[in-house]
Amino acid sequence: MPAIVADGLYKVFGKRAQRGVEALKAGATKDDLRKDGLTAAVIDANFTVEPGEIFVVMGLSGSGKSTLIRMVNGLWEATAGDLEIYGENLGKLSDAGLRRVRREKVSMVFQHFALLPHRTVGENAAYGLKIQGINKADREAKAERALELVGLGGWGGSYPGELSGGMQQRVGLARALAAGTDILLMDEAFSALDPLIRRDMQDQLVELQQKLDKTILFITHDLNEAMRIGDRIAMMRDGRVEQIGTAEQILNNPANDYVSTFIQDVDRTKVLKAAHIAEHPPAVLGAEQGPKAAHKLLRETANSWLVVLRRDRTPVGVLWEDDVARAVRLARTQLPWSSQHEMPVVPHDTPIAELFEHSAKHLSPLIVVDEQQRFLGVIPRVTLLTAVGETQNETTTEIQAITTTGDARPGSGATAVAPRKEGEQA
Ligand code: ADP
Ligand code: MG
């Protein structure tokens, strides 16, 4: 069952908001409504958040993000449409039912921490457990455990004022974790932190999610933050969700001009992964074959290198034409793995930015493998360079460093470069 489902969700502020929704459904714009004194904050939002997912809602200020999250939190009633939390339709619940869902299913982390200054860190973390009817000893234990999870073990006796901004936000996070709900709602939770601390918090959140398997609805106006932590991202503009997808999907197939303009400045090399640019190797040989078969294959495919795979598709390495030719000349029966035999294997989810490092160290194409170490495809240098071709960014100098080093072997990597499309199998 999905954690959160929004189905045709609207929020219009102002008198006779319902009529605003009807007007929107009939084709009126946000501006049309404004003339009638109505604000269309969320317009026809449809999305599903799966359990264990980090779903990011991204948009500029005023695009309706906070309004959306407040509806998910049950703080604000939708003007139209349905919102389900683990199958319970918030609009159809009694007040008591709504309170129960809010208590048991969702916790909220705010941008400005919302800590009580005259309560200790421990009391702040435990805040909210009391209304759940949990006794004092259990509250303290849960709070302490949550503080440990966010790296604040032992700080329970301090006061918020004694903590840095980053630490205070971790108390806010601990409070949400202590509540033990599956869903965490985070509204610009890291936006007030300075950039380095913010990066730390992003990493820590992803780590915590992996450890605790929480479902996180995370709101931000920062695209890089969205791309860094989001399993999927919903791009909002003026109350509407313009596109939902993974960072890769949005970067590669922006739904419209607005989204493509928006993503122009993103550093693709940090978002796109090895599997994304891996391609079919021009020639693949079975590990049980000999030099003659290798030679024949190279001639037939007019290539200077080939990839050797075992029967279970785990890679053995890359073989080069001159080594193969020598083995044939010397009538060898074994494939000529030299002492310098290279096997630059990279996991499928390595960010492209990190591939430059590997590529600089090795002459042969990179071999991309899946989680079971099975072969997925290759990334010749040329492909790596093409992948970031249009993007001018900090990697440019790295690229230049690699290209000027040059390839010692003739023809290496100079295969046709048609980057593999999404979902296509190697
Ligand atoms: P974001 O969080 O993306 O900055 P908000 O959801 O806060 O956007 O606001 C979306 C729109 O709804 C804005 O135009 C804002 O002025 C309006 N809005 C938000 N809250 C209210 C409210 N309580 N009453 C009237 N208009 C509101
Ligand atoms: Mg907001």
Image (spheres, helix red, strand yellow):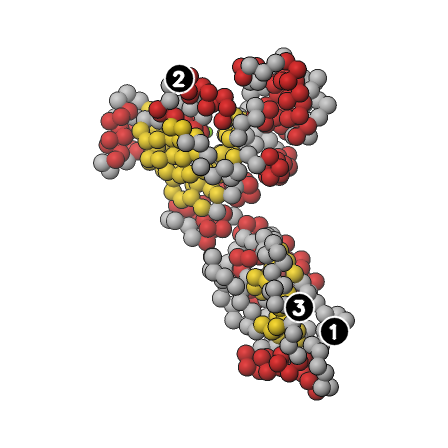
> Which residue matches tag 3?
317
**Spatial CA span between label 3 and label 2:** 64 Å
Q: Establish if 295 lies above or below 28.
A: below
Q: Position of residue 264 (x, y in %)?
A: 47, 49
Which badge, 3 or 1, comes first in the chain's sequence? Answer: 3
Q: Image quadrant for the N terminus?
A: top left
Q: Secondary structure at mark 1?
A: loop
Q: Is tag 3's residue or tag 2's residue first in the polypeptide sequence?
A: 2
Residue 314 lies in quadrant: bottom right
Mark 1, residue position: 338
Extreme-right residue of the structure: 339
On the image, the x and y values in percent for residue 390 come to 51, 58
Mark 1 → mark 2, Cα distance in angstroms: 74 Å
Q: Position of residue 414 (x, y in %)?
A: 57, 72
Task: Point out residue 265 in the picture as x, y percentages from the top left corner.
Answer: 50, 48
Q: Check disc 1 and give the amino acid type.
A: Ser
